[in-house]
């Protein structure tokens, strides 16, 4: 091909005027006589050149040429033969990471390289119009043909986006100019669509291959009477995995249905869901409605197999739990906590947590707890080596404390009948397996005096003094 040289007029004027200006500056510094004339002349020429160069004609792509199809891609393939073989292709990664290219094509998507000749070739073949209509990611070249076909249909249905054909991907990857990698995390789902399990799996696989699963943070997938639906996520809505334990799923549906949406039982979805397993259990505890007895009972059943530390969090949600003997109010809630306490690995810890929360409201309206109970079959307490000193329990406990144990016995019998635990386990959790010692009786008396804000009577003072002499000596 012959080449001819042509004088660039604009370049001549640009450079010539610049030379005149520079000489004028030198003349100004050296105070030559023609300094002002030289500067003024150079600037005038520059102004004239800029004025002329402001008029410029550009090529306009007509609307009919936008939206290249397979024919355009064929031009790309034909053009590859005339370009340098093995040219480096680059492009920006998308999603949560960057795509490092595909081994079969030697692609490297890190630093873009553009050349004037490459862009001219693209313009001649109308390839630049592809990027306006096409959603493209190089990693999808690894999908099977049938998977890519399904993905193409899904993108058209869900996002109104077009994908290049599977055969075109190798050309786009190997082309010497970087094709923009589409922003997967920018996809927006505007309405709900029915999809099949296979389609959801293909969509998940494509997003995972592109290292971007953020879409599942903006959409939810649920199983309805009409099949599987993918739709935009509502405000405050959280997706949970449908493959959790049956009791966990049932609890979520019954008590957290307004905020938790259950996915189909497809285990590939589990990776995309953040609120699952132990995190989901923690959510249940944090959002437990402690005024709803059935809610607490359901949660207690779920926590039965969890660690003592997790169960303790449920107990910490309560100040006190009151069971009304006369009306039965509070029994279901107490029953749930007793069942939880019995399931503790550390039985003493479970018992302590329970007894710190439980109150019983008697038929007379009195509110009692385990510290009010006297668990002693003997009617008299003896002191001294030969039992020469004695005090009767009726003289020490004058406000019915000796009858309070009967309320706990009745509660244990009711719980045992409801198969919460065996009578022996319930006796243990309520700390009624052994009779009170003299020290225990003294603690009960002190608790009674502090609770009623009363002073000790003569018999009570005698008991206290005898305890100090014979127990502490």
Image (cartoon, rainbow, N blue to C red):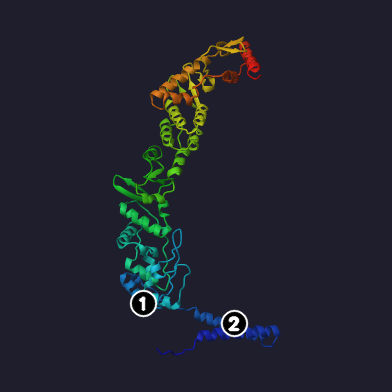
157 displayed left or right of 439: left
Task: Give percent across and percent down for residue 260.
Answer: 40, 43
Please state the horizontal and vertical placement of residue 288, each as a whole percent of the image.
Answer: 45, 36
- On screen, residue 248 versus residue 389, left or right, reads left
Give the mark nearest the N terminus, 2 or 1: 2
- Residue 137 appears in view: no
**Closer to the camera, 309 or 43?**
309
Q: Residue at x 40, y 67 (%)?
A: 103
Judge whether 314 appears above or below 240 on screen.
above
Where residue 102 appears, x then y in whole percent?
Answer: 40, 66
Q: Which mark is residue 378?
A: none
Residue picked out by circle 1: 79
Under tag 2, what secondary structure? helix
Question: Front-most of 118 and 77?
Answer: 77
Helix, strand or loop under label 1: helix
Up-down: is 371 above or below 179? Answer: above
- Residue at image position (40%, 41%) is 258
**Which residue does the numbered mark 2 point to in the structure image?**
43
Confirm whether residue 215 shows in the render: yes
The residue positioned farthest toward the front in the image shown:
386
Depth order, front residue of 460/44: 460
Evaluate if marks 2 and 1 touch, with contact meaning CB atoms under 8 Å apart: no
């Amino acid at each position: 091909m012959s080449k001819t040289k042509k004088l660039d007029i604009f370049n001549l004027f640009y450079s010539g005027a610049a030379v005149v200006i520079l000489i004028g500056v030198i003349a100004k510094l050296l105070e030559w006589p023609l300094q002002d004339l030289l500067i003024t002349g150079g600037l005038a020429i520059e102004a004239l050149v800029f004025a002329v160069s402001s008029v410029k004609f550009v090529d306009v792509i007509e609307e009919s040429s936008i939206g290249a199809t397979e024919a355009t891609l064929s031009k790309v393939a034909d053009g590859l033969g005339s370009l340098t073989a093995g040219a480096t292709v680059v492009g920006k990664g998308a999603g949560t990471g960057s795509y490092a290219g595909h081994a079969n094509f030697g692609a490297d998507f890190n630093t873009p390289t553009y050349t004037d000749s490459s862009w001219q070739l693209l313009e001649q073949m109308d390839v630049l119009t592809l990027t306006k209509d096409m959603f493209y990611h190089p990693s999808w070249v690894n999908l099977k043909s049938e998977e890519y076909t399904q993905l193409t249909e899904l993108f058209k249905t869900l996002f109104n986006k077009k994908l290049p054909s599977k055969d075109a991907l190798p050309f786009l990857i190997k082309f010497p100019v970087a094709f923009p990698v589409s922003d997967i995390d920018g996809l927006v789902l505007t309405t709900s669509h029915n999809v099949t399990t296979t389609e959801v799996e293909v969509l998940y696989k494509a997003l995972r291959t592109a290292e971007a699963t953020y879409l599942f943070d903006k959409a939810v997938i649920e199983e309805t009477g009409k099949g599987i639906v993918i739709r935009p996520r509502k405000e405050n809505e959280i997706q949970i995995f449908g493959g959790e334990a049956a009791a966990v799923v049932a609890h979520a549906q019954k008590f957290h249905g307004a905020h938790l949406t259950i996915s189909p039982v497809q285990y590939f979805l589990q990776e995309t869901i953040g609120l699952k397993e132990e995190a989901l259990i923690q959510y249940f505890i944090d959002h437990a409605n402690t005024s709803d007895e059935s809610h607490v009972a359901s949660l207690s059943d779920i926590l039965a197999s969890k660690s003592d530390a997790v169960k303790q969090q449920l107990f910490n949600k309560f100040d006190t739990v009151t069971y009304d003997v006369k009306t039965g109010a509070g029994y279901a809630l107490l029953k749930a906590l007793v069942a939880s306490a019995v399931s503790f690995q550390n039985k003493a810890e479970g018992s302590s947590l329970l007894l710190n929360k439980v109150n019983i409201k008697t038929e007379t309206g009195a509110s009692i707890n385990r510290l009010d109970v006297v668990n002693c079959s003997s009617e008299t307490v003896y002191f001294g080596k030969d039992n020469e000193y004695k005090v009767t329990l009726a003289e020490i406990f004058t406000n019915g404390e000796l009858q309070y144990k009967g309320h706990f016995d009745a509660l244990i019998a009711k719980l045992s009948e409801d198969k919460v635990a065996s009578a022996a386990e319930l006796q243990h959790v309520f700390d009624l397996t052994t009779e009170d010692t003299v020290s225990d009786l003294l603690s009960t008396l002190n608790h009674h005096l502090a609770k009623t804000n009363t002073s000790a009577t003569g018999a009570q003072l005698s008991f206290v003094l005898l305890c100090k002499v014979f127990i502490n000596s």
